[in-house]
Image: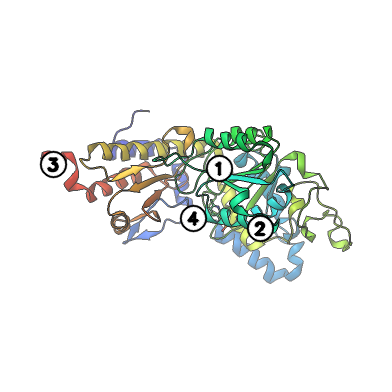
């Protein structure tokens, strides 16, 4: 599509946007007396207006029924989590029985590593991307230590080439091949939180399997943002949070995926708890743990109803909007943002912003990360003063993510104008005037 950097063009895109009515379903934070330009859905998605009703409903059930709320009310709590796998299946590209909603991301990563990281004498190494989100690094290091291994020896971090910001998929695959039968596990962020780079999950999984290793992904920045086909890609396991692109609220409940080939395997080692045991036997208080033969067999504790209520409200909006349409608009929004930033850069006599997110359509999601080469914090604060809620990552990266359910093309145009306002003295146009 040929884009134009003008308000009229952006407004036209908004007029033809089949998802435009969904913005009204969200509370847009106010900045300086008017709607902010909220480009922070990669960090915390906005609150759907239906969330309050969902939470109040459960509070009322608790007030009205007490413990009987497990069996009464619109969504009895004993089965509350049953609603999620079907709703998440199209979003993560999995069978419902491969999905479980529970805990939070890092907790789930630990639980999955208990099952999928079984180091032996020779096969004990873990491969991950350099500068993975710190929580993943800590989880991996502590799992190695749990097995008495030294991260300096057992952890291989694949780096970006010198002067580059993205890690080549080929380099990850080459590292897997190089370490071959020493590799026990490959763990990569489906989208790197810092650069916004999407990794080739299918090819990385195939390479891991070729050397006999398991492969899992942290999908915090991928779920609800890009197309995922976890089942078809043969991914062994994955975990995600629901508070970014899934708009389910701060610290809300996370999710996990295990491939169909493992879910009914009772011999898989896991940290067990009563909520993972056969549903019919749960209240028989038996001594033996008899896991549910689906991903739900990895549950430990009972349902986090008050954190699941916003998740349910948010996923209903995804179903109503249609995930295909969400993806299509997301691609268009990020393409327009990249077009505008590239235009600002090429008009500028001095390059101040370097886009570090890969620009090919299948290598990024909604997020665009900008390395600010000068006065980074000042630009970030300037954006803030002008109503843009973006995200700052040390030492000098601003992350912005226009998201399909509540952002508009006109906001992207406005964002470009605000950046230009910061750079007036340095743009060629102004120099020529
Ligand atoms: C890529 C990534 N992994 C892990 C986490 C940690 O998630 P949690 O605090 O839900 O465990 C985050 C949080 O933002 C993240 O961005």
**Residue 413 visible here:** yes
Of pointers 1 and 2, the one earlier in the residue sequence: 2
> Looking at the image, which residue is at 28% across and 36% down?
343
Pick the front one: 247 or 73: 247
Mark 4, Cα crowd under 10 Å, few <14 / some 14-19 / many 20+, is some
Which residue is tagged 2? 145
Which residue is tagged 4? 44
Report the image quarter containing ligand 1: bottom right
Mark 1, Cα crowd under 10 Å, few <14 / some 14-19 / many 20+, is many
Say the numbered circle drawn on residue 190.
1
Mark 3, Cα crowd under 10 Å, few <14 / some 14-19 / many 20+, is few
Of pointers 3 and 1, the one earlier in the residue sequence: 1
| Whether the residue under disc 1 has CB within 8 Å of ligand 1 | no
Between the C-alphas of marks 1 and 2, the distance is 25 Å
Foreground tag (1 vs 4): 1
Between the C-alphas of marks 3 and 1, the distance is 43 Å
Mark 1, secondary structure of its residue: loop
Pick the front one: 135 or 389: 135
Residue found at the very far top of the displayed protein: 1
Q: Quadrant of residue 306?
A: bottom right
Which residue is tagged 3? 431
The N terminus sits in image quarter: top left
Say the numbered circle drawn on residue 147.
none
């Amino acid at each position: 599509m040929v884009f134009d950097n003008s308000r009229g063009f952006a407004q036209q895109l908004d007029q033809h946007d089949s998802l435009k009515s969904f913005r009204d379903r969200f509370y847009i934070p106010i900045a300086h007396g008017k709607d902010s330009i909220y480009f922070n859905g990669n960090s915390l998605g906005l609150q759907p207006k239906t969330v309050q009703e969902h939470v109040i409903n459960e509070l009322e059930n608790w007030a009205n029924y007490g413990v009987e709320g497990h069996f009464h009310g619109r969504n009895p709590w004993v089965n509350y989590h049953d609603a999620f796998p079907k709703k998440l299946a199209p979003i993560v590209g999995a069978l419902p029985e491969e999905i479980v909603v529970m805990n939070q991301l890092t907790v789930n990563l630990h639980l999955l590593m208990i099952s999928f990281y079984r180091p032996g004498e020779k096969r004990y190494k873990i491969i991950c991307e350099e500068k993975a989100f710190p929580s993943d690094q800590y989880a991996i290091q502590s799992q190695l230590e749990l097995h008495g291994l030294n991260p300096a020896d057992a952890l291989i971090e694949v780096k970006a080439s010198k002067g580059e910001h993205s890690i080549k998929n080929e380099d990850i695959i080459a590292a897997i091949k190089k370490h071959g039968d020493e590799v026990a596990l490959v763990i990569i962020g489906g989208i790197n939180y810092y650069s916004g780079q999407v990794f080739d999950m299918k090819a990385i999984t195939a390479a891991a399997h070729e050397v006999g290793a398991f492969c899992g992904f942290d999908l915090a920045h991928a779920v609800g943002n890009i197309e995922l086909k976890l089942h078809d890609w043969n991914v062994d396991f994955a975990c995600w949070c629901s508070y970014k692109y899934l708009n389910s609220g701060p610290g809300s409940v996370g999710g996990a995926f295990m491939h169909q080939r493992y879910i009914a395997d009772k011999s898989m080692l896991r940290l067990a708890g009563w909520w993972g045991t056969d549903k019919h036997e749960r209240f028989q208080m038996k001594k033996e743990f008899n896991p549910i033969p689906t991903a739900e067999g990895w549950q430990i504790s009972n349902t986090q109803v008050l954190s699941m209520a916003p998740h349910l409200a948010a996923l209903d909006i995804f179903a109503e909007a249609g995930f295909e349409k969400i993806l299509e608009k997301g691609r268009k929004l990020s393409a327009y943002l990249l077009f505008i930033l590239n235009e600002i850069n090429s008009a500028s006599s001095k390059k101040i912003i370097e886009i570090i997110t890969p620009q090919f359509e299948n290598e990024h999601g909604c997020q665009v990360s900008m390395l600010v080469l000068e006065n980074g914090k000042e630009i970030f604060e300037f954006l803030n003063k002008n109503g843009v809620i973006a995200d700052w990552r040390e030492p000098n990266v601003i992350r912005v993510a226009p998201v399909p359910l509540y952002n508009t093309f006109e906001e992207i145009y406005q964002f470009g104008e605000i950046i230009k306002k910061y750079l007036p003295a340095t743009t060629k146009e102004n120099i020529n005037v």
